[in-house]
Amino acid sequence: MLETQLHLISAVLIALAAIVPIYLTIKLKDNLKKLTAILSIFILIHAVYQVVGFFGLTLLADGVFEPLSVAVLIFFGIIYSGIAKQRNMSIKNMVVVWSPGTLLLLMNSITIMLLLGALGIFIWLASQSKNIRSFQFQMSIFIIIWILGDMVIFYGNGIAVFSALQSDVGSGIHVVSMVFFSVML
């Protein structure tokens, strides 16, 4: 019961956080427009994840929409790093093909793996800027909070053991990450 309420609260916070990037996507031009469009797509996919989770379709939410939102976040980080460098670099496209069976088997850990990849990108970008108030640093904190929430959810599913934590704490941490993300924008 509490978990479904937290999904609803997260969905509302995400929808509120989406207002600013969507507005900026309409108003900006060139590279900034591309960046805010990708960020808006991430936010909207993550909102769909929360709504699907609210309706109890956890297989669809955790197996499709959450990893998809993280993949878009990684794509955002790659595009952001290319624009932030202001150099022409060729980025090699790497595609990993997952069969549906493999994806379902790895559903609980694929989000963590993708988040760690996104975290690596934003930590690298934050270390380049050397400013604690930078957008890259704030994104790194958001991703760390998100990873902590997913690790606690692993506890609730019996995958990892954190004896001092309760099962609904992961969803609560996830809501905290969404609040942080909303405030950050």
Image: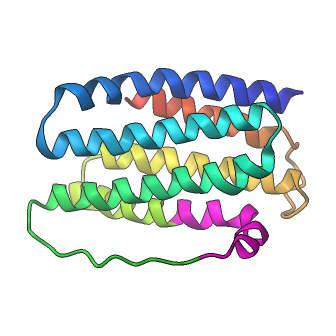
Residue at x 26%, y 32% (from the top left corner): 25
Q: State how many labels appear.
A: 0
- Residue 128 lies left or right of residue 7; in this view the side is left
Residue 121: % across, % down: 38, 63
Give whichever of 17, 140 is nearer the camera.
17
Residue at x 9%, y 69% (from the top left corner): 88
Q: Is residue 107 within the magenta segment?
A: yes
Residue 15: % across, % down: 52, 24
- Magenta span covers which residues? 98-116
Residue at x 55%, y 64% (from the top left corner): 114
Q: Is residue 36 above or below residue 5?
A: below
Residue 54: % across, % down: 76, 31
Give whichever of 170, 42 is nearer the camera.
42
- Residue 102 lies left or right of residue 75; in this view the side is right
Q: Quadrant of the N terminus?
A: top right
Q: Is residue 18 within the magenta segment?
A: no
